[in-house]
Each structure stands twice: as structure tokens, then as C-alpha cells.
Image: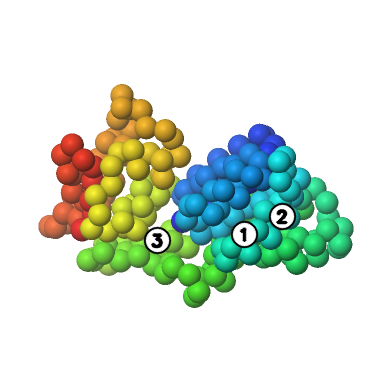
Amino acid sequence: MRILLVEDDKLTADFILQGLQQAGFSTCHASDGESGLFKAKTEQFDLAVIDIMLPKRDGISVIEEMRAARIGIPVIVLSARGSVDDKVRGLRAGGDDYLVKPFSFTELLARIQAQLRRSAPFSEPTVLTVADLSIDLLSRKVTRAGIRIDLQPREFALLEYLMRNTGRVVSKTMIMEHVWEYNFDPQSNIVEARMYRLRDKIDKPFDRELIHTIRGVGYVLE
């Protein structure tokens, strides 16, 4: 699952991004309200975490514009202001939850998971299945032929991306941008190395390969 973080404070953003990536989420970061709104309107996300005090455009107006544009993903509001009036304002703007700074990442993660569970019946399925391979996006459980497979967070994010694009070839550039949030470096072998480890767990113990290399193009799961 992919999460949009709109937060201008670098320390706070790094803290949240690191925690989300370690939890297996794909993330995208915007450091001001205008770029955050642009990303929300032009890219696909499952949830957004938005700070109130932002440069260029405040978080309240970002959320209001998202709702006006019929972007219905859950939004968790972050703010250093914790009065009842502030919370009411954030929720009335279209926020689904309100978290006051400072906060623990464990609490933020629990709130993210709760919002994803609540929105699941009205959005994308939370369980993806291809042949005998299945992944639960909320419990992070992966099985093939009924056998549990343990994946590292980045391996899980890579498999999720492949399964969301079942039957479509995805390039190394696409994988880097969606799974690692990096610009593509042609000298890097990070995709090949992680793909090798993923295939070792997903395909090697079984008779049928699901992940295929399309030479000179990328990878496809089918």
C-alpha cells in the first residue's frame, strides 16, 4: 500500500518515512502544501498523512481541495495544536483522524492500519491473489500453496507492486520510483539483487515460476 506524507519538518518527515518503509509501506513525501496537493491529484495513494502548518498552502486547504476533487482516501491530520476547536476544524475539513505532535510512531502506525481497515470495503481489496500466491496487505501475510512465506519489508513492497500490475511488464525505473522512491540509477543493481532474493522465496521452492524476466525491458508476474 502507498502512503502520501505531506510534512515540511525534515526531522519529522524522516522519522515517519523510515518507520513506514520499515513497516513495508511504499511512501511518497511532499514538503509543502502545493506539491502535496498536486501529488494527491495526480498519483494513486491508499492513505495520506498531512500536517496542518505547511508552506505555500496549509494542510486544511489541501484536505478541502482533495475532498472537493472527490479524492476519498483516508486522511490523518498531524498538528502541534491539540485543542478541541483545532481537532474539529481538521475533521470538518475532511480529515478522518487527528494526531497531536509529539506522537509515537507506534500510535501513528496503529491509526494508519485502523483507517485502512475501515476504508477497505469501499476501496481496493486488501488481499491480492495470483494463482496459488496470496498476500494480505493489512496483516502482511504471504502464502503460496498454503505455505507461509516470510518477507522483508522491501521484499513485501516489491511483491505487492508486481501483484498490483499482474500481467503487465514493469521496468527497473518504475520499480525504483514506486518501491524505493528513488530516481533511476543505471549503475545500480539494487532491483536485480532484491528481485533475486524475492524469487528465491516465491518461486524456487515451487514447481511453477510466477515472476519472469523480460530481457532488456523489466519484470512481469503472471
Q: Are marks 3 and 1 in contact (CB under 8 Å)?
A: no
Q: Which mark is residue 66?
A: 1
In the rendered image, which residue does mark 3 sit on?
141
Q: Are marks 2 and 1 in contact (CB under 8 Å)?
A: no
Q: Residue at x 60, y 50 (%)?
A: 37
Q: Is residue 88 above or below residue 42?
A: below
Residue in the foreground of this view, choosing between 88 and 56: 56
Q: Of the residues under marks 3 and 2, which one precedes in the sequence?
A: 2
Classed neighbour count for the residue bearing mark 1: other residues with Cα under 10 Å, few (<14), some (14–19), many (≥20): many
- Cα separation, mark 3 vs mark 2, equals 37 Å
Q: How is the image coloured?
A: rainbow
In the rendered image, which residue does mark 2 sit on?
61
Q: Amino acid at mark 2?
A: Ser
- Cα separation, mark 2 vs mark 1, equals 8 Å
Residue 221: x and y in percent read 23, 54
Q: Is residue 71 left or right of residue 188?
A: right
Residue in the foreground of this view, choosing between 164 and 209: 164
Q: Of the residues under marks 2 and 1, which one precedes in the sequence?
A: 2
